[in-house]
Amino acid sequence: MKRLLICAMSAWMLGMATAAHAQTSEFMLRGFADIGSTTFTAERSFEAVLGDAGGTVWGGGVDVVLPFQIFVDLRASQYKQTGERVFLHQGQQFNLGIPTTVTVTPLTLVGGYRADFGWRIVPYAGGGIGWHRYRETSQFAEASENVDERFQGYHLLGGAEFRLARWIGTAFEAEWSTVPDALGGDANSVSKEFNETDLGGVTFRVKIVIGS
Amino acid sequence: MVRMFGPGVRVLVCTAVLAAGAVATDHAQLAPAGLRLLSETSAPAIDRGLRALDPPRAPRNGGPDITMTGGEPFVPGSIIVKFRPGTSLDAQRMILAQVDGSAGRPPSYADFDIVSIDPNADPEAAARRIEAQPDVEYAQARYRVHPRFTPNDPLYAQQWNYTTLDMERAWDINQGASPAVVVAVLDSGVAYRSAVVRYQARAFTLDGVPFRSLGVVDVPFAAAPELAGPDRFVAPRDFIWDTTLPFDLDGHGTHVAGTIGQLTNNSTGVAGMAFNVRIMPVKVIASLWDLIFNSPFQGTDDVVARGIRYAADNGAHVINMSIGRTGPSAPVIREAIAYAVGRGVFVAVAAGNDFESGNRVERLAEFAPDIEGMVAVGGIGRNRERAFYSNTGSYVELVAPGGNGRIGGAPGGILQQTLDFDVVETYLRSPSRYTAPRFDSFAYDYLQGTSMAAPHVSGFAALLIQQGITSPAAIEAAMKRYAIDLGPAGRDNEYGHGLINPRASLRGLGLAR
């Protein structure tokens, strides 16, 4: 994942050095796809069950740029990882070999400001609200023992976009999100053991933006 | 060993004879004075149970391969779709295009299609989308159907203890552990092999009735058909006769071993908790026949302590001790248990059957609260209430089915295969009909006692070890954490932390549930 991000960043920097500058128009409707790496706030819980505190997130959505350099994004993404159920005792972890798949699917609405002053790079920042679907399924589980719940969260993000051509651009973006009280509610969970309740985290992503 | 005979139920009280004064030696002998092995084999075992002619078969070992499948309840990459009659192929293709799906050849014996979709797509969402179309009768993900492991042993239906523990769902997760897990049964021995042994049966007096000497007797032994199997037994040891031949001259140890590891799903007899484990028979208790045959040792504290250390040093992962005594404390046994736990061995001990006889402190069980990795086990009946005999006290940590003949009569006990008591306890006949015993005949018997409760916990520990919880302290913690609270809320002196809950412990913790 790191290698992918480095490649993308290199391509972006190369593009920045060679492509012509083009200021965005007053109104734009664009689509985008992205790939990123997220690290969950509930690091210990994710690491215990899934072997990693985060992982790859795929996403996409639509981006509307309005007058006064205001933008609104609607984005859907997904994180999915399979690990195994565990037992914890006095700091020791015992893996139980029962496959467990966690899927987090956020739908986010972002509003923000694009600092488009005719430079090659267009920095932007914003914040918004998200609806996060959390699913957890385990082998041998009865239906009631699996999880399929939705939680509301909030996030802030910032990044910079560079337009490679009239119809296509790329961006690097960082996002911090919080989804309070989504985890740690069930006594039969590592999140309860670790007292980790937030489903949010920090995500770095690369976007391909299409449209004008 | 004290036995009580209830109405229709054979009651085995676990309080063992632990007479003082025995002297231990460090060297095992194959044939010490008083015992002569005449033959390595004997006539085949006699099974007087319901299926006497069925030979034992190895248990089926066809559990799901948990490393090959993901945690989703469905198969990714495809869904099941049934179109309404008359829907044209073009219409079907247009509908399936909504989920980038394509139908292959219709499967045989089916009036529906299996539709391929993107492996990364959510099959449930795709099915919902397709099902919303008027031309579709139904659509669904291809949910996995799990086995519900119900042993096919014909007498399994009478083993209420496993239903009480929800073992069928627990066995779905872990089918009886594996031969890699060794459970030591420290008891009266186990019917683990065939042999003919020559003893000298001396005269004795039982309850004031004199019995004559039988002189030299050749006694046949056989392995319990429902226990034996290739490489089933490991490192057998007899600390009563100081040999490597821990024959069971009583039936108690064989019954206990059956609860732990009775061959299961072999269309014969009954089931056991952890039916794939290997059993280490370690004889530390002298039966009446051992005493009649003048065994050099009796079941004393030092013998038990040596048995514990032997098991720990010879590869046992779990030690079951359905034995105990009251009286003064037993520091030598406490030290031995601490030694075993320190070597990574989990220890389950019967909490005692003395409740109606003064509820005196059970000395082997009393250490349990102080040693993480050792639990003292009380007994419940099929009504999930403490059995009338089961000791209470601060040392009771968990309960398991021990049987209670006062609730439901004989079937209220715990059913396993053991020695046929009719040909073992010949001293219960009149002196004129008293004969030499034989230990090659078997039957299915209901017994009750905390002796019967402890092996449920030992078998459970074996399952947990196989599942991945290998530290004795963690095994105890996993048992207590998921125990079903009985009696007053929270820990209490009757039920401890509650009734063991194998399935929940085996499942452990998820990320959010």
Image (cartoon, coloured by chain):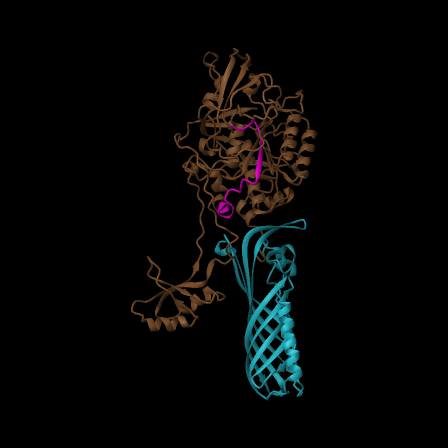
Position in image of residue B284 (x %, y %): 60, 26
Query: What colour denotes chain A?
Result: cyan
Query: From this viewpoint, is residue B335 visible?
Result: yes
Which part of the image, by quadrant, shows the C terminus of chain B? bottom right
Q: Is residue B153 above or below residue A154?
A: above
Q: Residue at x 53, y 33 (%)?
A: B257
Give the residue displayed 66% in from the left and 41% down from the top. Answer: B372
B181 inside magenta stretch: yes
Observer-nearest of A145 and B50:
B50
Q: Residue B25, position in %: x, y? A: 67, 23
- In this rendering, the answer to whether B456 lies above or below B211 is below
Does the magenta segment cover residue A79?
no
Quarter holding the N terminus of chain B is top right
Q: Position of residue B472 (x, y in %)?
A: 63, 42
Q: Is residue B122 above or below residue B271?
A: below
Left or right of B301? Residue B58 is left
Q: Tell me what residue is drawn at x 61 percent, y 28 percent.
A: B358
- B266 or A8, nearer to the observer: A8
For the question of whether residue B499 can be seen, the reply is no
Q: Colour of chain B?
A: brown
Q: Position of residue A51 (x, y in %)?
A: 61, 58
Using the image as rendered, state which of residue B272 and residue B117 is in the foreground.
B117
The residue range painted magenta reads B169-191
